[in-house]
Image (tube, rainbow, N blue to C red):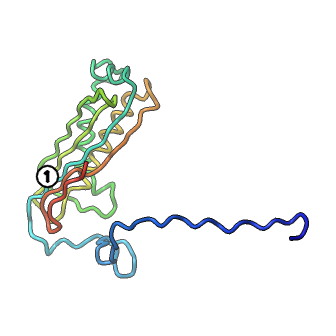
Amino acid sequence: MAQGKQTAAPPAKAAAKPKDKTISDSELTHIDHRGEARMVDVSGKSLTERIAVAEGKVIMRKETLDLVIAGNALKGDVLGAARLAGIMAAKRTHGLIPLCHPLPITKVEVDINPEHALPGFLVQATVKVTGQTGVEMEALVAVSIACLTIYDMVKAVEKGMQIDGIRLLEKRGGKSGDYRAED
Protein backbone atom coordinates (compact mmCIF):
# COMPACT_ATOMS: atom_id res chain seq x y z
CA MET A 1 0.00 0.00 0.00
CA ALA A 2 1.36 3.41 -0.93
CA GLN A 3 2.23 5.71 1.90
CA GLY A 4 -0.59 8.14 2.82
CA LYS A 5 -3.24 6.16 0.94
CA GLN A 6 -5.63 3.92 2.73
CA THR A 7 -8.10 1.63 1.12
CA ALA A 8 -11.58 1.60 2.48
CA ALA A 9 -12.91 -1.60 3.91
CA PRO A 10 -15.57 -3.20 1.78
CA PRO A 11 -19.04 -2.02 2.80
CA ALA A 12 -20.78 -4.26 5.28
CA LYS A 13 -23.65 -6.23 3.85
CA ALA A 14 -27.02 -5.11 5.07
CA ALA A 15 -28.94 -7.75 6.93
CA ALA A 16 -31.63 -9.27 4.78
CA LYS A 17 -35.07 -8.08 5.81
CA PRO A 18 -37.77 -10.70 6.02
CA LYS A 19 -40.52 -10.18 3.48
CA ASP A 20 -44.10 -10.17 4.73
CA LYS A 21 -45.56 -10.98 1.36
CA THR A 22 -44.75 -10.39 -2.26
CA ILE A 23 -46.97 -7.66 -3.65
CA SER A 24 -47.94 -7.92 -7.28
CA ASP A 25 -48.78 -4.92 -9.43
CA SER A 26 -52.40 -6.06 -9.55
CA GLU A 27 -52.66 -5.64 -5.75
CA LEU A 28 -51.62 -1.98 -5.90
CA THR A 29 -55.03 -0.76 -6.98
CA HIS A 30 -54.10 2.93 -7.15
CA ILE A 31 -51.32 2.27 -9.69
CA ASP A 32 -52.14 1.55 -13.33
CA HIS A 33 -50.23 -0.76 -15.70
CA ARG A 34 -47.79 2.10 -16.52
CA GLY A 35 -47.03 2.71 -12.84
CA GLU A 36 -49.07 5.93 -12.72
CA ALA A 37 -51.50 6.94 -10.00
CA ARG A 38 -55.17 6.41 -10.74
CA MET A 39 -58.49 6.50 -8.93
CA VAL A 40 -59.93 3.00 -8.68
CA ASP A 41 -63.13 2.38 -10.64
CA VAL A 42 -65.61 1.03 -8.08
CA SER A 43 -68.67 1.29 -10.34
CA GLY A 44 -68.89 -2.50 -10.75
CA LYS A 45 -68.92 -3.17 -7.01
CA SER A 46 -72.13 -3.75 -5.09
CA LEU A 47 -73.32 -1.50 -2.32
CA THR A 48 -72.45 -3.10 1.02
CA GLU A 49 -72.23 -1.88 4.58
CA ARG A 50 -68.64 -1.04 5.44
CA ILE A 51 -67.24 -0.04 8.82
CA ALA A 52 -63.74 1.00 9.86
CA VAL A 53 -62.32 1.72 13.31
CA ALA A 54 -59.01 3.52 13.82
CA GLU A 55 -57.11 4.73 16.87
CA GLY A 56 -54.33 7.07 17.90
CA LYS A 57 -52.83 8.50 21.07
CA VAL A 58 -51.79 11.92 22.27
CA ILE A 59 -49.12 11.52 24.93
CA MET A 60 -48.52 14.42 27.32
CA ARG A 61 -47.39 15.26 30.83
CA LYS A 62 -49.73 14.33 33.68
CA GLU A 63 -50.22 18.02 34.46
CA THR A 64 -51.39 18.72 30.92
CA LEU A 65 -53.77 15.77 31.01
CA ASP A 66 -55.20 16.99 34.31
CA LEU A 67 -55.67 20.50 32.88
CA VAL A 68 -57.65 19.19 29.90
CA ILE A 69 -59.77 16.85 32.04
CA ALA A 70 -60.60 19.72 34.40
CA GLY A 71 -61.69 21.85 31.44
CA ASN A 72 -59.18 24.60 32.24
CA ALA A 73 -57.45 24.93 28.85
CA LEU A 74 -57.24 28.55 27.73
CA LYS A 75 -58.66 27.81 24.27
CA GLY A 76 -61.81 26.18 25.65
CA ASP A 77 -63.34 22.71 25.31
CA VAL A 78 -60.38 20.72 24.01
CA LEU A 79 -62.12 17.37 23.67
CA GLY A 80 -65.30 18.84 22.15
CA ALA A 81 -63.28 20.72 19.54
CA ALA A 82 -61.18 17.61 18.78
CA ARG A 83 -64.29 15.44 18.43
CA LEU A 84 -65.90 17.89 15.98
CA ALA A 85 -62.66 18.30 14.03
CA GLY A 86 -62.40 14.52 13.64
CA ILE A 87 -65.97 14.24 12.39
CA MET A 88 -65.49 17.09 9.92
CA ALA A 89 -62.21 15.61 8.69
CA ALA A 90 -63.77 12.20 8.01
CA LYS A 91 -66.40 13.88 5.83
CA ARG A 92 -63.69 15.71 3.86
CA THR A 93 -61.19 12.89 3.42
CA HIS A 94 -61.65 12.82 -0.35
CA GLY A 95 -60.42 16.43 -0.47
CA LEU A 96 -57.29 15.60 1.53
CA ILE A 97 -56.19 12.23 0.16
CA PRO A 98 -55.95 12.57 -3.63
CA LEU A 99 -57.27 9.17 -4.74
CA CYS A 100 -60.07 8.71 -2.19
CA HIS A 101 -63.66 8.64 -3.39
CA PRO A 102 -66.22 11.08 -1.98
CA LEU A 103 -68.51 8.87 0.10
CA PRO A 104 -72.01 9.27 1.54
CA ILE A 105 -70.86 8.53 5.10
CA THR A 106 -73.71 7.45 7.36
CA LYS A 107 -71.89 7.51 10.71
CA VAL A 108 -68.80 9.09 12.22
CA GLU A 109 -68.16 8.65 15.90
CA VAL A 110 -65.04 10.00 17.60
CA ASP A 111 -64.37 8.84 21.16
CA ILE A 112 -61.64 10.49 23.23
CA ASN A 113 -60.77 8.95 26.57
CA PRO A 114 -58.13 9.89 29.12
CA GLU A 115 -55.47 7.25 29.67
CA HIS A 116 -53.62 7.99 32.88
CA ALA A 117 -51.09 5.23 32.18
CA LEU A 118 -49.79 7.07 29.07
CA PRO A 119 -50.47 9.83 30.32
CA GLY A 120 -52.64 11.27 27.57
CA PHE A 121 -55.68 10.53 25.47
CA LEU A 122 -56.74 7.53 23.41
CA VAL A 123 -58.68 8.65 20.34
CA GLN A 124 -60.86 6.21 18.40
CA ALA A 125 -62.98 6.86 15.32
CA THR A 126 -65.66 4.62 13.86
CA VAL A 127 -66.89 5.40 10.36
CA LYS A 128 -69.71 3.67 8.50
CA VAL A 129 -71.02 3.78 4.94
CA THR A 130 -73.20 1.73 2.66
CA GLY A 131 -71.18 2.04 -0.48
CA GLN A 132 -68.88 0.57 -3.07
CA THR A 133 -65.60 1.24 -1.27
CA GLY A 134 -64.38 1.20 2.30
CA VAL A 135 -63.96 3.92 4.91
CA GLU A 136 -60.55 3.03 6.34
CA MET A 137 -59.02 6.32 5.22
CA GLU A 138 -61.92 8.30 6.68
CA ALA A 139 -61.42 6.65 10.08
CA LEU A 140 -57.65 7.23 9.97
CA VAL A 141 -58.07 10.87 8.93
CA ALA A 142 -60.66 11.44 11.69
CA VAL A 143 -58.24 10.12 14.32
CA SER A 144 -55.29 12.08 12.92
CA ILE A 145 -57.14 15.39 12.89
CA ALA A 146 -58.69 14.83 16.33
CA CYS A 147 -55.19 14.17 17.72
CA LEU A 148 -53.77 17.24 15.99
CA THR A 149 -56.62 19.35 17.37
CA ILE A 150 -55.86 18.22 20.92
CA TYR A 151 -52.23 19.20 20.30
CA ASP A 152 -53.25 22.58 18.89
CA MET A 153 -55.59 23.35 21.78
CA VAL A 154 -52.95 22.80 24.49
CA LYS A 155 -49.62 23.43 22.74
CA ALA A 156 -49.24 26.69 24.70
CA VAL A 157 -48.93 24.56 27.85
CA GLU A 158 -46.84 21.72 26.39
CA LYS A 159 -45.13 21.72 23.02
CA GLY A 160 -43.49 18.31 23.60
CA MET A 161 -46.68 16.26 23.31
CA GLN A 162 -46.45 13.23 21.02
CA ILE A 163 -49.01 11.85 18.62
CA ASP A 164 -48.46 8.14 18.34
CA GLY A 165 -49.89 4.82 17.26
CA ILE A 166 -52.30 5.93 14.56
CA ARG A 167 -53.53 2.71 12.99
CA LEU A 168 -56.48 0.83 11.60
CA LEU A 169 -57.96 -1.42 14.29
CA GLU A 170 -60.75 -3.01 12.33
CA LYS A 171 -62.50 -3.05 8.99
CA ARG A 172 -65.66 -4.88 8.05
CA GLY A 173 -67.36 -5.40 4.71
CA GLY A 174 -66.31 -5.31 1.11
CA LYS A 175 -64.61 -7.73 -1.25
CA SER A 176 -61.40 -8.05 0.76
CA GLY A 177 -63.32 -9.18 3.84
CA ASP A 178 -62.88 -8.35 7.48
CA TYR A 179 -59.66 -7.23 9.18
CA ARG A 180 -58.75 -6.91 12.84
CA ALA A 181 -55.36 -5.58 13.99
CA GLU A 182 -53.23 -7.77 16.19
CA ASP A 183 -52.41 -6.33 19.61
| Front in this rendered view, residue 44 or 125 | 125
Q: Residue at x 74, y 66 (%)?
A: 8
Going by the numbered disc 1, the residue's amino acid type is Lys
Q: Position of residue 49 (x, y in %)?
A: 9, 59
Furthest residue toward right: 3
Residue 4, located in which quarter of the rendered image? Answer: bottom right
| Front in this rendered view, residue 15 or 77 | 15
Q: Is residue 75 left or right of residue 181?
A: right
Task: Tally the marks.
Answer: 1
Furthest residue toward front: 1
Q: Position of residue 15 (x, y in %)?
A: 51, 64
Q: Is residue 152 left or right of residue 48?
A: right
Q: Is residue 162 left or right of residue 68?
A: right
Q: Residue at x 23, y 37 (%)?
A: 84
Q: Position of residue 37 (x, y in %)?
A: 37, 71
Q: Is residue 78 above or below residue 131?
A: above
Classify mark 1: residues with Cα within 10 Å, few (<14), some (14-19) or many (20+): many
Residue 172, located in which quarter of the rendered image? Answer: bottom left
- Is the N terminus in the top left, top right, bottom left or bottom right quadrant? bottom right
Secondary structure under badge 1?
Answer: strand
| Front in this rendered view, residue 78 or 122 | 122
Furthest residue toward bottom: 33
Q: Is residue 73 above or below residue 30?
A: above
| Front in this rendered view, residue 91 or 5 | 5
Residue 88, located in which quarter of the rendered image? Answer: top left
Q: Position of residue 70 (x, y in %)?
A: 27, 18
Q: Residue at x 14, y 54 (%)?
A: 51
Residue picked out by circle 1: 128
